[in-house]
Amino acid sequence: MNTIDAYISTHPEEIQVLLEKVRAFIRENAPGATEDIKYGIPTFVLNGNLVHFAAFKHHIGFYPAPSGLVEFADELAPYKAGKGSVQFPLDQPLPLELIRKIVAFRVAENLAKKASRKKKPQNAPE
């Protein structure tokens, strides 16, 4: 499986609908990001890994890097979370507004990292 389309197609239709919603929402809120499969799951990349998502038996896993979880800890509190992941139960509506905010945060974070790498050291020769 080397595309997000292929990944999504392996799931039942009702899960495919949820995965496509998450995908479309990330795509809409991360202009310029590219799609890939990393660690066997759908990944959006923008100056490094941006976010990952995946389907499981009882939830959609969302992986915004630990920084995304820390930044939105209060809003993510109702959901089960791990070191770099959060679980959105299949029997509840997807928190699309929260996903939008997390993706926007991660986009800004990755763009800031890229900008800081481009800065010249202050005592660089001219």
Image: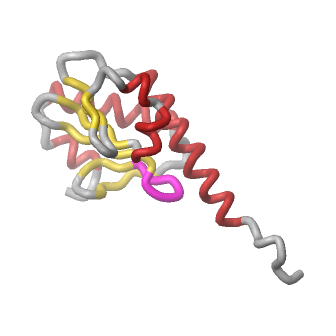
Residue 70 image point, x, y percent: 44, 37
Give the side of residue 56 with respect to residue 38, left or right: left
Q: Residue at x 30, y 35 (%)?
A: 86
Q: Quadrant of the N terminus?
A: bottom left
Residue 94 image point, x, y percent: 31, 21
Q: Residue at x 28, y 34 (%)?
A: 81
Q: Quadrant of residue 53?
A: top left
Q: Residue at x 21, y 41 (%)?
A: 8
Task: Please name the colour scheme applied to the rendered image.
Answer: secondary structure
Q: Quadrant of residue 21?
A: top left
Q: Is residue 66 magenta?
A: no
Query: What span is colored magenta in the figure?
Result: 44-49
Residue 96 image point, x, y percent: 40, 23
Give the side of residue 85 with respect to residue 70, left or right: left
Q: Residue at x 25, y 57 (%)?
A: 39
Give the side of residue 81 with respect to residue 56, left or right: right
Q: Is residue 45 magenta?
A: yes
Give the side of residue 19 with respect to residue 121, left or right: left
* Labels in figure, total: 0
Q: Quadrant of the C terminus?
A: bottom right
Q: Please, is residue 42 above or below residue 120 in the view?
A: above
Residue 58 image point, x, y percent: 13, 28
Q: Residue furthest bottom?
A: 125
Q: Quadrant of residue 49?
A: bottom left
Of 126 and 66, the residue lying toward us = 66
Q: Residue furthest right?
A: 126
